[in-house]
Image: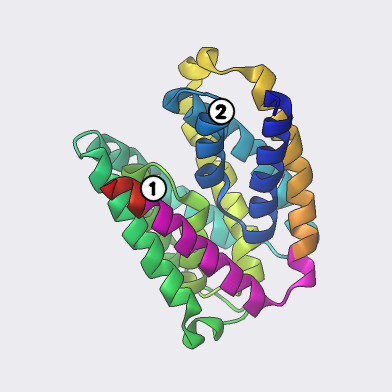
Amino acid sequence: MSALLLALGAGAVTGLALGALGGGGSVLAVPALIYLLGFSPAAATTASLVVVTVTSATALVAHAREGAVRWRAGAVFAAAGLGPAAVGGVVSRHLPAALLTGAFAVLAAVAAVRMLRPAAAAVTGPGPVRASRVAGAGAGLGAVTGVLGVGGGFLAVPSLVNVVGLRMRAAIGTSLLVITVNSLTALAARAGAAADVDWSAVGPFAGAAILGAWDGRRLAARLSAGTLQRLFAYALLAVAAFMLADAVG
């Protein structure tokens, strides 16, 4: 199969996940860029940030039109995580890669189990949310994301549901704002690494991801909040299992 078809297929799946579930972009894009398109890990991470940034921004517009983005909560959540993410990135340099991967897998599994519990569906509606609670959750996610290197969307949605108290649809839309801000910040820090990226492959990948994100948004609109929450939790468990196997393998 040609590199172009692989890029288009992988990009479509990545965009579908971001549009429908509000997360999973980096978790899906990085392995696809490495194993399907032959990118080095460093180039794959940089290219993934580009893909996730443009795709998340596109999906954010679509969800905003549906009224599914809590702008104030999302802005506070994202801003609170910037400093802890920078500190976490420094800490991560001194930890073994297998430990980081295993820790993320365990954390993802715990978040998924919490979302599958019946009580998780009974989250509060779109009422007032305390800024201190949002900031605390954002700072915690920023620290974890900085240390572990991945998981912005896959951990943002459970945090917005379980800690902040948003309904699933609002959590998905708001997480896209968080992902866009975090990805832009991380991409700015990697500006010097862009020369190593094969943009001829990234272009089709990103284009297919943008189209997939619109399809994902339409898919999300047809499913109930409970179904979306279960799909997200099962996807999170699958990611956790894959990463745990990679850590111990």
| Colour mapping used in the image | rainbow
Badge 1 marks a residue whose secondary structure is helix
Outermost residue toward the top? 195
Q: Secondary structure at mark 2?
A: helix
Q: Which residue is mark 2?
A: 47
Q: Is residue 234 magenta?
A: yes
Residue 37, x across and y down, in percent? 58, 27
Q: Residue at x 79, y 70 (%)?
A: 222
Residue 148 vs residue 66: left or right? left
Q: Which SS type dominates the magenta stretch?
A: helix
Dividing the picture into quadrants, the one containing residue 47 is top right
On the image, numbered disc 1 is attached to which residue?
Answer: 145
Is residue 4 among what the camera can see? yes
Q: Nearer the viewer, mark 1 or mark 2?
A: 2
**Segment tinted magenta in the rendering:** 220-243
Q: Nearer the viewer, residue 102 or 89?
A: 102
Which amino acid lies under the numbered mark 1 shown in the image of this protein? Thr
> First in sequence: mark 1 or mark 2?
2
As displayed, is residue 150 above or below residue 104? above
Residue 232, label in figure: none
Q: Is residue 4 above or below residue 18?
A: above
Residue 43 at what x, y percent from top left? 49, 23
| Placement of the N terminus among the 4 image quadrants | top right
- Give residue 125's position: percent from left, percent from top: 61, 81
Residue 143 visible in the current orientation: no
> Residue 82: image x %, image y %?
41, 44
Q: Quadrant of residue 6?
A: top right
